[in-house]
Amino acid sequence: MPFADLNPLEWTLYGGIETIAGLILIALLLVFISGPARRKIRWVVLFLAIHVVLLAVRVPFPDDSALPEVLRFLAHFLLLSSLGLGVFLLLTSSRLSRSFLPALPQIFLDIGHSLVYAIAFLIALGSSGVKPTELFAGSALLTAVVGLSLRDTLGNLFAGLAIQAQRPFEIGDWIQFNKETTQIGQVVEINWRATKVVTQDKVEIIVPNGLLAQAPIINYSRPTTTTRRTVYVHVPYEIPPLRVKEIIKAALTDTPGVLTDPSPSINTSGFDDRGVQLCVRFFINDFSKRGRLESAVRDRIWYALVRHDIDIPIPPRAVHVSKAGRGAVSRREEKRVAQQERALGYIDFFDHLPDAIRRRLAGRAQTRLYAENEVIVHQGEKGEELFILLSGEVAVTVAQPGEDPVELSRLKKGNFFGEMAALTGEPRTATVRATRECELLAIGKAALAEVFESSPELAEHVSQTIARRQANLNALLSEHAPSHPQVVAEHSHRLLQRIKEFFSI
């Protein structure tokens, strides 16, 4: 029976029954829906409350007035909207629905809400005596004009539905939808008309879904977040490529953000007028940091090549002309040796070295550059060099089996480390990492062997100095009195024997 044939009392009673059904539905929603979806229940409650108000307002008006018909239509529409929206929420957002229905994309939820209101509107019209088919009866020309004007809009709508159904990408994925690398961004929203993408430059691009449906899409977040990046470097022809590859691979071992599994690979990609071109490929799992990590890899490669006296070839069109006689070269070398000789003064067990031997040792030492966060020595590895810090800062860490590394100290200019490995060949007892760019003076076993060969008595002085320093350090750390001189002497003797064995003195 249409609502128009009901008297006010019958209409109120009929609406009251549906109102009770709405209240029962709201109670079910409050029980079975939690989380952010719970906020949508307020619309169900609001529509039902307005419906009840219209029921109360309708009663005093006579049947022959025009206002009751409007109130009837609005009250019925709001009631049906409340019931329809409540049932839709119960089917898509409740704990009951999760057991048999997967989570729907937002675009399907939005379309579902729109259908609920459209169906409620048509049913309300029918209950008021209006045939819905009469609303759509019109000229074919008008239908064609409306269809043509909505062609792009409908195309984007159906393309959005296809994207949500196939799921080639999701919110949070990094995609490329154009050949231009500037058209790479992270998906932040997918709606019925377009997809919003934010690029690395923090620029928002709104791409119509119809365009995405026709374009090849590269998804850097699928099937996993692991992606491979590539940088290129040229090295001289006179350096064996295999040697350079080992140097670069070692330099990438501890680069933060570069994965060790899959491990980096270096391939010879070509020969040109600059030299041998190497292709360095490595994997990352955070695509948003790709630019920063590529820069870090290039930095590590540069520092590693410089430490091994390998120059990166410049283009042949760049011509550098310099004129320097033997005197200028000799003066530069003397200046370098003098600076390194002063740096040897930071090491206490070199205090008694004769000037000639000290200068010879300074000439054999090498300066090395390390990038920020680069590991200089690893705990447990074999080593034959000691290092003097000329600039920068390093962190000394120790890791016990099964535990996280613990930072023991920070060393700055004038400090040195690695003396035990250089003098006895024993494994490194700590890991030393550069906290910022560092310049170090490295003194190897060959240079020290030459010193001990020229001054055999120096080995005893070195062993005594190191034994005393270790005893004082242990006493400071344990807050006990310094070790007895006899204990220090015994430790010095054992250390002297190890030095003699290591250097075959």
Image (cartoon, rainbow, N blue to C red):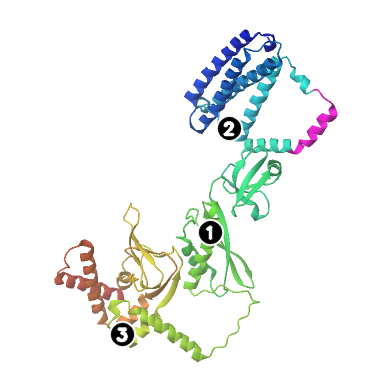
Q: Is residue 274 magenta?
A: no
Residue indicated by mark 2: 104
Asked whether 268 or 130 is in front, the reply is 130
The CA distance from mark 3 to mark 2 is 81 Å
Is 232 on the left-hand or right-hand side of 180? left
Specify whether residue 504 is in view: no
Q: Nearer the viewer, residue 32 or 372?
A: 32
Indicate the amino acid at tag 3.
Ser
Nearer the camera: disc 3 or disc 2: 2
Q: Which residues are magenta?
A: 137-152
Callout 1 amino acid: Arg
Give the secondary structure at mark 3. Answer: helix
Q: Is residue 289 visible?
A: yes
Nearer the observer: mark 3 or 1; the answer is 1
Q: Which residue was labeled with disc 3? A: 454
| Residue ID at (53%, 19%) | 25
